[in-house]
Structure formats: structure tokens, C-alpha cells
Amino acid sequence: MLAALSGFLILFIVARVLSPADNAEFLSFWAALFAVYGVLNGLTAETTRAVGSVNNRATAQPHRIGVSVFSAGLLVGGALAALVLALGLPFAHALFGATHGQLIVLILAATCIVYAVHASLGGALQGMGLWPPYTMLVGLEAMLRVGAIGLAAALGAGLLGIEMATLAALGTWLLVLLFSPSARAALPARADVTLVPFLRQTGHALVSSVATAALVVSYPLLVRLTTSPEEFALSAPLLLAVSLTRAPIMLPLQAFQGVVITQVIRARDRGLQILRKPALVVLSLGVGGGVLAAWVGPWIMLLFGPDYVVEGWVLGALTLAASFIAFLTLFGTTLLAQGNHRAYAAGWLLATALAVAALLLPYSTEVRVILSLSVGPMAGIAVHALALRSRQGH
């Protein structure tokens, strides 16, 4: 909940202090930064599964099973940083502007390495069932980020200053380790396999997380790449609406995917049964929230400024679409916990491919975005549901 509230507050602050055109640029940077976080969520998920499997075996020497998840996590972070540099530097100006494009790519590469430690710690804490320090990790990260951005905005730091302020939360894991003895207990955590199998399985999770990030956190970049510069400069209200309508559902769900993973590990073949209650909550939020967003959403959008006009039907449709992505996340997390990495990846990759295809259709930006965020996730849900039903049938 704190993560969701901090996200709302950040979007509100930035929209109030930047022009719509600069806010569109900030949302592109925000999308790229959270794309890195989102991809490394695959490392968190696989670490949770691997450490949780070790703990679930209740072995006499649980820390001598496989590779250290922190050393493996740093290898993953370094490889991702190299990939960001290789793919990002040639397109830095197109993605982030000519003035600071290369600087932003370098910062994103460094973020890959630093956040890999955060991701590994989060996975180890969840896998070991150390929920108080994990809650501290999630909550402190949100507070540091919103505090730094609020300070930068108050000082009139401008677009680049606000973008740099978002990086303050990268030190969260270090603070948690310094002040929480129970968090330090996770440092010796090891996976249930050796390095090569762990990296291979993490690779599956990371590939899926690329697709996940594309739909969930880095979506403004997809819109930017499929929209003319003139249209994109006017897209800040719509992009803000996408973030606002999904935040109440997606942010808490992403933060506590580890809870789902640990439950499924304990009852491996009852994935669909375990999902009944959270799925009902997501459905209620999607339908009820969609009606509410269509009714009061346009007035709420105007709180961000007179330029942020979005029609009610658009807000309602975006909220319902957010529930589709939440279902896809729930089903995919369950498959990952069951060790079905291929079906997990297949669902997310299909969803992303269809979402990108929908953005290429010759319609208005609003219609393209709604179709993209609905058709793609529904196809992915079908793939995941079939895989879960097949597993339960056996």
C-alpha cells in the first residue's frame, strides 16, 4: 500500500512542477528506470523460489546447498548492465533526448548492478520467510524515493534534477542490512542448485521479466517508439492515466509476489486453488475500480493541472485493462513457483508481442493503448491458465 501511495504522490508532484512536454520526458525516464527494476524482479522471483525450496527441505545444513544467491545476483546485474550499454547507447538520443541521453543510459547501466543486490536480498528474505525486514526493504525504498523527489521539486531542480533524485532509493538495501540483524541473516542464503542451473533458470525469469516490464512499468517507452514525436509530446495525460489506473492493483501485487511463490511451493499442485481468493480481489478491483474511474476519474485528473484532461471511458477501460495485467502476473507467478519457466515466459512474450502489434494499428493513441493493454494480457492469461490446468490435471 505504501508503494502505491508513494507512486501516486510522485506522479502528482512531477506533473505539478513540470510542463506536460517535460513530464512526458520524465515518464519515459521513469519507464526505463522501472524497466531495469522490473527485469531484475525476475532475479527476485527466482531467488525466492530457490531459497524457499532449500528452506522447505528443512535440511541440516541449508546454507550449503548451491550457489550464493548474492554472488549470482551480481553476475546477473553485471550482464544486464553490459546489455543496457550495448543496446542503449546507440539509441540514447532517440529514447531520452540529445542533451542527457547518454548520461541516462550510463546511469541505468550502473543501476543494474546496484539494484541486483536489492533484488537478491528481497528474494532471499522472502524465500526464508523473513517478512519484517522484507517489509522494511519495500517501505523504506518507497519513502526514500518520494522524499528525494519531493525535495528536488521543492528546490526547483528541473527535469534532470528530478530524474536524478529517483536514484536515492538505490541505497535502501544497504540501510536495511546496516540496521536489521534479521536481514543480515539472509546474507549466507544459497540456492537449491549450483551456479549454471541457477543462471539458466534466472535467464528464463529475466526474459519473461523483460516482457513483464514492457507491459507493466516501461510501457511509456513502447508508446514513444510507436508514436510520432508530435503526438508523444501531447501524451503525458494519457501516460499518467495509465500509471494511475494500474498503481492501486499492480504495485502491492508486485511487492508481495513472494508470498504467492512461497504458498505454491508448499502446495505445488494446487496453483489454481491458491489463486481463487487473490483472483477474486483483482476482479473486484478491476470492475469496481473501472466504474469508479469512469465516474470520478476525469475530475481527479484535473488535480494534476488543467492540461491533464482524460475522458471517463478511457479511464474506466484502462482500469479494467490493469486487472488483466494483474491476472497475468498472478498466473505467471504461480507457474514460476511450480518451476514451469517455459510456460511462464511463453505467456508474457505472447502478451507483449500482441500489445506491441496493437500499438501499430492506425487508430488514435487512446484506442491503441487500450487495445494494447487488453488484447495482449488476455492472450497471455489463456496460455498461463492452460498450463496451470494441465499441471493440476496431472
Image: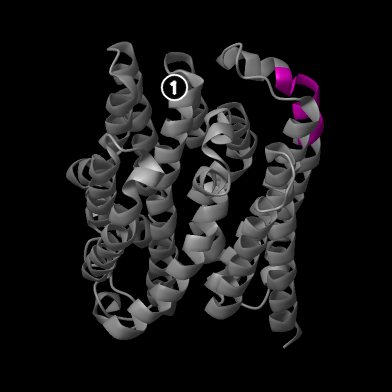
Which quadrant is home to the C terminus?
A: bottom right
Say whether residue 313 is left or right of residue 61. Answer: right
Q: Where is residue 170 in the image (x, y as percent from the top left)?
A: 27, 42
Q: Where is residue 192 in the image (x, y as percent from the top left)?
A: 36, 80
Q: Under tag 1, what secondary structure?
A: helix
* Residue at 38%, 54% in the rendered image: 130
When asked about the image quadrant of residue 370, the answer is top right
Q: In this view, does 238 lie above or below 284?
A: above
The verdict on residue 117 being magenta is no
* Residue at 27%, 34% in the rendered image: 99
The verdict on residue 296 being magenta is yes
When asked about the image quadrant of residue 186, the answer is bottom left
* Residue at 64%, 68% in the rendered image: 350
Name of the residue lying farthest toward the left = 178
Most foreground residue, 266 or 24: 24
Whether residue 341 is visible:
yes
Q: Is residue 372 above or below residue 293?
A: below
Name of the residue lying farthest toward the bottom = 394
Whether residue 339 is visible:
no
Q: Position of residue 386 (x, y in %)?
A: 74, 76
When asked about the image quadrant of residue 72, the answer is bottom left
Q: Mark 1 points at which residue?
A: 14
Q: Is residue 345 above or below residue 95?
A: below
Q: Where does the magenta region start and end?
A: 290-298
Number of on-image labels: 1
Badge 1 amino acid: Val
Q: Position of residue 391 (x, y in %)?
A: 69, 82
